[in-house]
């Protein structure tokens, strides 16, 4: 048991999600017999998991120890950092700490659950300092592609950690304050045991760019299209981008409508917490149609090609309120998240097919990343000067590149974690002391199931190999009727009738060939029928369908 290896005097770090992958962040710290959780996020399904939209870390390890879980601190309001709270909080039942904007976003999400009134959300001010069990926590304001991104200074008797969350160094973030450089430098002078840091762009040279540059680019771009309707797709949580689009639209006498539920929800949270005050209210999806097309700018969800988002529905021509026309322009003010390329291309091709011009970040200055490139990482190490670098929030190639960069920046030690690895941060020499089970859950309809479990494995096999159901009616030893066969995803049309007839005959022969004692054995009979189906399809099609045999004894 890992618990037997945990000294109450030491400080430990344990990621259960977000190390070796981008998304699904769940990080744990242990000290003095208590656990602190930092972030609880989701990722999104792909073709490898049919029917799955949301994936999240399996919290079983910490759920079993929830009596010792002092609290959950959220670094910011992105889905990959707080999106799992609405699914997993009942397993944890701990207080949640967040700054005002993040708390507003979380409350809106929890209103969709049955337990929203049970979650204790403790708002902490920007640059605030507070205690969570034995963990003394201070917030340091950073910049990112969402309001109120915070690094956490976690002070314990076992060492001090700076946990960055997601960040960049943006001199002109447009919404919110710039990075609190003075606080980071002061922290470096105090001494930092470990820097647990974002690695997303650790392979990217230079800097990530500024939202101020994007604001200029958007204003210039919208000015190129007089007399044409302009739609802009971006991440709903990028409030600075919403601000820049609105300002660019106003500069060309256009009004802005928000098209998509998540955009409206973020707008409400932003205005409720003091952001976007200098903008007039956005036009509704319904009312924007009454404006001349040259007076419109639409901000749409769906920059990643999500099939149910506004932009995909617009591209398909089935949005209930918005209908783009030939000559209109759609700007993708976003990056392609790896894995979404096909979905994005499908939406873009659909728009182009309808005579709509598509503009991306390859064509104009309409997007910058929210994560630090190599020069920004180097600057952080120069300010903070930790003894240990622990790269997180990235695939293995990102983590390795980040660790190498940290060592080049004269950081004495670097440890690259994987989900489930327990690192002793201090005091003394840092080391990996063991591992704990880690895994993933996915939202399958309305329930959570293991991502690698039998249910999804079977579904995948059905998707790629089809399925067959056989019904056998027997007395003790003999078939009383011809087998009944139903197949799904394997045959097409009446031309396969002879194939089915032959297969039914083959199933009957397979059962008849069994010895009398085997025909009395339900397992032997069903296995003979199952193998007959799979072998026949494999010989004819090269497929082995998922096969279910129902045996009825009369």
Image (cartoon, rainbow, N blue to C red):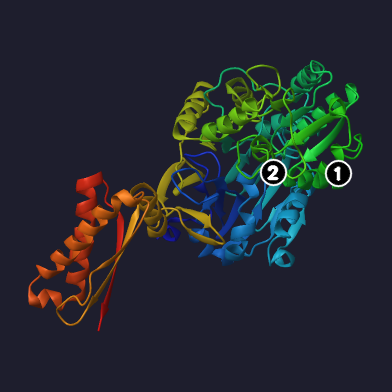
Q: Residue 271 carries which label?
A: 1
Residue extending farthest to the bottom is 554
- Taking the image as shown, residue 341 lies to the left or right of residue 526, namely right
Q: Name the residue under label 2.
A: 76
Labels in figure, total: 2
Q: Position of residue 130 (x, y in %)?
A: 74, 51
Residue at 15 percent across and 77 percent down: it is: 478
First in sequence: mark 1 vs mark 2: 2
Residue at 70 percent across and 18 percent down: it is: 365
Residue extending farthest to the left is 515
Q: Which mark is residue 344?
A: none
- Taking the image as shown, residue 186 lies to the left or right of residue 64, namely right
Residue extending farthest to the front is 494
121 or 137, which lies in front?
A: 121
Provide the secondary structure element on which disc 2 rests.
loop
Distance from Cα at disc 1 to Cα at disc 2: 17 Å
Q: In which quarter of the image is the C terminus?
A: bottom left
364 or 452, which lies in front?
A: 364
92 or 261, which lies in front?
A: 261
- Taking the image as shown, residue 348 lies to the left or right of residue 490, namely right
Residue at 18 percent across and 75 percent down: it is: 479
Q: Where is residue 267 in the image (x, y as percent from the top left)?
A: 81, 43
Q: Is residue 10 visible in this depiction of the protein?
A: no
Q: Is residue 63 above or below residue 427?
A: below
Q: Where is residue 177 in the image (x, y as percent from the top left)?
A: 80, 32
Give neighbour class at mark 1: few <14, some 14-19, many 20+ (Cα, 10 Å). some
Q: In which quarter of the image is the N terminus?
A: bottom left
Provide the secondary structure element on which disc 1 rests.
helix
């Amino acid at each position: 048991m890992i618990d037997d290896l945990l000294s109450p005097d030491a400080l430990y770090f344990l990621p259960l999600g977000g190390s070796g992958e981008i998304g699904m962040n769940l990080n744990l710290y242990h000290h003095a017999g208590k656990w602190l959780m930092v972030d609880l996020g989701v990722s999104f399904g792909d073709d490898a998991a049919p029917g799955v939209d949301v994936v999240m870390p399996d919290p079983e390890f910490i759920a079993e120890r929830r009596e010792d879980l002092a609290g959950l601190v959220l670094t910011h309001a992105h889905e990959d950092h707080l999106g799992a709270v609405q699914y997993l909080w009942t397993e944890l039942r701990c207080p949640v700490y967040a700054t005002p904007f993040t708390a507003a976003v979380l409350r809106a999400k929890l209103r969709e659950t049955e337990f929203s009134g049970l979650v204790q959300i403790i708002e902490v001010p920007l640059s605030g300092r507070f205690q969570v069990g034995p963990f003394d926590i201070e917030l340091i304001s950073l910049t990112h592609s969402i309001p109120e991104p915070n690094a956490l200074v976690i002070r314990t008797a076992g060492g001090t950690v700076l946990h960055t969350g997601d960040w960049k160094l943006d001199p002109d973030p447009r919404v919110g304050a710039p990075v609190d450089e003075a606080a980071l430098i002061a922290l470096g002078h105090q001494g930092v045991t470990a820097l647990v840091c974002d690695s997303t762009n650790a392979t990217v040279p230079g800097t990530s760019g500024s939202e101020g540059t994007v604001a200029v680019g958007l204003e210039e771009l919208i000015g190129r299209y007089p007399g044409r309707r302009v739609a802009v797709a971006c991440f709903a949580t990028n409030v600075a981008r919403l601000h820049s689009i609105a300002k660019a639209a106003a500069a060309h006498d256009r009004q802005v409508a928000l098209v998509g539920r998540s955009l409206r929800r973020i707008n409400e949270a932003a205005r409720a917490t003091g952001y976007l005050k200098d903008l007039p209210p956005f036009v509704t999806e319904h009312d924007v149609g009454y404006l001349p097309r040259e007076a419109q700018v639409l901000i749409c969800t769906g920059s990643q090609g999500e099939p149910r988002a506004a932009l995909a529905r617009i591209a398909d021509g089935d949005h209930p309120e918005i209908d783009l026309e030939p000559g209109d322009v759609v700007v993708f003010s976003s990056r392609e998240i790896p894995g979404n390329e096909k979905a994005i291309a499908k939406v873009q091709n659909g728009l182009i097919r309808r005579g709509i011009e598509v503009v991306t970040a390859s064509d104009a200055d309409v997007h910058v990343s929210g994560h630090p490139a190599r020069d920004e990482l180097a600057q952080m190490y120069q300010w903070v000067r930790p003894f240990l670098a622990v790269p997180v929030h990235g695939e293995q190639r990102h983590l390795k590149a980040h660790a190498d960069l940290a060592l080049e920046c004269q950081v004495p030690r670097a440890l690259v974690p994987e989900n489930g690895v327990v690192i002793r941060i201090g005091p003394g020499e840092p080391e990996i002391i063991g591992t704990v089970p880690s895994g993933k859950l996915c939202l399958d309809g309305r329930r959570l199931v293991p991502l690698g479990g039998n249910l999804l494995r079977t579904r995948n096999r059905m998707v790629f190999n089809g399925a067959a159901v056989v019904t056998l009616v027997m007395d003790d030893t003999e078939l009383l009727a011809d087998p009944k066969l139903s197949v799904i995803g394997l045959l097409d049309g009446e031309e396969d009738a002879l194939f089915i007839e032959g297969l039914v005959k083959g199933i009957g022969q397979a059962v008849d060939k069994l010895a009398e004692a085997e025909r009395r054995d339900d397992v032997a009979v069903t296995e003979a029928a199952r193998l007959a189906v799979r072998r026949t399809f494999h010989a004819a099609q090269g497929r082995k369908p998922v096969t279910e045999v129902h045996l009825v004894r009369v």
